Image (spheres, helix red, strand yellow):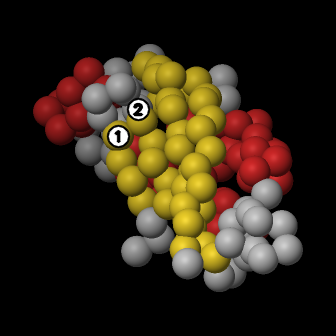
């Protein structure tokens, strides 16, 4: 029997959506106000979902304290109150769209979990705009 457990987290970060190989006009046409050269910010809401068998000994899919600490050390410290384009290595050459941020988060967390556990990342950039990545 598989069960999914979820942990919510939050971080604030600035970013700019743009491609270095495009001129300002093309960036503005594609990314709109999100390509502002002075950046803009979001209050990101993160939901980390872990699916697996319930451990017969502990009753847990994953210890939520361990998951909480992992999200804090790998994601919140790395991203919170940062300019993603400037201060986060993964986005030096990768456009920090919500889609790419979710994939980066998945890639940072998945190796830290037991291999048999499934991981899904849901990232809310705004209350109405969110993405989900399951490693597929």
Q: Is residue 120 left or right of residue 60?
A: left
How far apart marks 2 and 1 lie (CA) works out to 6 Å
Q: Which mark is residue 125?
A: 2
Earlier sequence position, callout 2 versus callout 1: 2
Viewer-closest of 123 and 14? 123
Please tell me which residue is depicted at 55% across the width and 61% down the height of the picture: 4
The answer to whether any part of residue 110 appears in the image is: yes
Residue 124 figure quarter? top left
Above or below, 86 relative to 58: above
Residue 63 lies, in percent from the top left, at 79, 57
Where does residue 49 sit, x and y in percent of width and height?
A: 55, 56
In which image quadrant can residue 50 be found?
Answer: bottom right
State the residue at coordinates (56%, 27%).
13
Front position in the image: 11 or 21: 11
> Can you tell which mark lies on residue 130?
1
Q: Tell me residue 10's x, y (percent).
A: 60, 30
Whether the residues at callouts 2 and 1 have beta carbons within 8 Å, the answer is yes
Residue shown at the point (68%, 72%) measured from the top left: 54
Q: Which of the numbered marks, if any, corresponds to residue 72?
A: none
Secondary structure under the numbered disc 2 in the rendered image = loop
In the drawing, does residue 6 fall left or right of residue 25? Answer: right
Q: Position of residue 93 (x, y in %)?
A: 50, 53
Q: Is residue 129 left or right of residue 114?
A: left
Residues 127 and 92: in front is 127
Name the side, left or right, on which 18 lies relative to 47: left
Most distant residue in the bottom direction:
116
- Position above or below: 74 against 134: above
């Amino acid at each position: 029997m598989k069960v999914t457990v979820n942990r919510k987290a939050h971080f604030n970060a600035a970013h700019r959506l743009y491609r270095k190989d495009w001129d300002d006009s093309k960036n503005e046409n594609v990314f709109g106000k999100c390509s502002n050269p002075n950046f803009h910010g979001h209050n990101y809401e993160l939901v980390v979902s872990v699916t697996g068998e319930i451990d017969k000994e502990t009753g847990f899919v994953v210890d939520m304290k361990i998951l909480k600490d992992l999200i804090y050390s790998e994601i919140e410290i790395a991203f919170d109150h940062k300019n993603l384009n400037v201060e986060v290595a993964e986005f030096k050459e990768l456009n920090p769209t919500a889609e790419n941020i979710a994939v980066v988060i998945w890639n940072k967390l998945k190796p830290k979990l037991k291999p048999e556990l499934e991981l899904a990342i849901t990232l809310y950039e705004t209350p109405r705009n969110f993405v989900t990545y399951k490693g597929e």
